[in-house]
Structure formats: C-alpha cells, structure tokens
Image: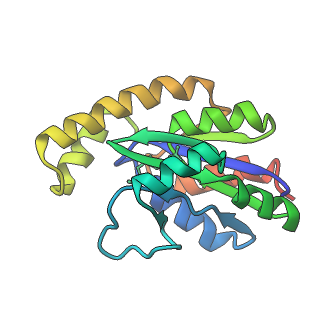
Amino acid sequence: MKRLFVISGSSGVGKGTVIKEFLKQNPGFKLSVSCTTRPMRLGEKDGESYYFISREEFKQGIENGDFIEWAEFSNNYYGTRKSIIEKALAKGENLILEIETQGALQVKNKISDAVLIFIAPPSFEELKKRLEGRQTEAPEVIQTRLDQAAREKNDSKNYDYIIVNDEVSNAVKNLEEIISQYAI
Ligand code: 5GP
C-alpha cells in the first residue's frame, strides 16, 4: 500500500457521490469493501457494496481479530478486514476506506500515517433539509441521523482535513488537492 485515506461524513452529506466522482477521475485508487450486518439495500451487491454477513459471523470475526477496525452504527456492525489492508499493502495500492468516525479513529491509532478526511455539510440546517428532502426515512430515523451527525462532527476535530460539500464538483476538487499531496 502506498497510502491509506480514510473518508468519513454524516449520512446525507453526499460523501458517496463525492468518492464515486473522485474514483471515476482517478482510477488508480482502490475503494475498500467493508463487512456489515445491515440488510442489503435495493441495487447493492454482495462483495461489491459490502460483504453482507450475519451478526454471528461478525462477532466471530471480532473474536478472531479479523478486523482492523469495527463499530456499531444504527444497530448494525460495520468493519474493515485486516486482509483488505494487507492485500493493498502487498500490491502497493492507494486505498480509500469510507467508514464512520469511531472506526476511522481506530485506524489512525494503528496506522499513524493514514490520512483522515471528513466531508461536512455546509451547515446543520442544510443537512436536516437534505435528509428530510430524501423522504425515505421516518422522522425518528432522521432525528437519529442528526444525532449521529452531531457526534461525528465532534469526532472530526481529530481529522487531518475537513471538506465542506457545498457543491460536488468543488468537494471533488478539494479531495484531489488533498490526496495529491500524498499519493504518487
Ligand atoms: P450505510 O449503512 O449507509 O451504508 O453506512 C452507514 C455508515 O457506516 C456510514 O457512515 C459508512 O461510512 C459507515 N461504514 C461503512 N463501512 C464501514 C466500516 O467498515 N467500518 C466503519 N467503522 N464504518 C463503516
């Protein structure tokens, strides 16, 4: 692995879109595939979006020390297998992890030269508007997401960089500028 980039951002902030755009324009980067116990959503593929595993398998993985980091988020487990990092290391790849903040801080503790990047909404009000505008979540779920966003914003104090996603193309440009300082 050349360098590990860890990208986080609250739900509704559009980090998925920013990362997808970045990868389209920078095909030399690899996106890590995480394990999760949450149900598969429409359009997702096992082994591509995530490795969808049972809670039992996940707990076994924790016991076996298979994960470099893991966290419980919205009542589900999420984690990155050590083997993903080891493979990228062996191949000399630049790897991107798209994970929430508790996991990101665990990674930073273990791999101190990992670069932590947080994608933030222009404002908390804007985030609320975006989440409500999706009309896919019940009001209580939206409230949980907003509480999580507040916690993640607090964790982002320990990040190396914060990108405000006011406009996707600007956010992608900022991400490229940051990453190009490290990646060869
Ligand atoms: P979603 O269920 O919407 O795909 O993801 C929920 C949250 O889990 C997002 O913030 C996402 O970045 C995070 N996440 C995805 N994979 C991992 C992982 O392997 N570890 C951790 N700690 N968080 C993850």
Relative to 177, 167 lies left or right: left
Residue at image coords 54%, 53%: 170
In-front residue for pair 6/39: 39
Q: Describe the colour scheme in one phrase.
A: rainbow
Residue 45 x/y as whole percent: 43, 76
Asked where in the image residue 21 lies, by quadrant, the reply is bottom right
Residue 29 x/y as whole percent: 71, 66
The residue sitting at the left extreme is: 139
Residue 168 x/y as whole percent: 47, 57
Residue at image coords 43%, 53%: 56
Can you see residue 4? yes
Can you see residue 168? no
Residue at image coords 18%, 57%: 136
Asked where in the image residue 148 lies, by quadrant, the reply is top left
Residue 59 x/y as whole percent: 49, 47
Asked where in the image residue 147 lies, by quadrant, the reply is top left
Relative to 25, 141 lies left or right: left
Screen quadrant of the C terminus? bottom right
Relative to 146, 119 lies left or right: right
In-front residue for pair 106/116: 106
Q: How many marks?
A: 0
Screen quadrant of the N terminus? bottom right
Relative to 49, 183 lies left or right: right
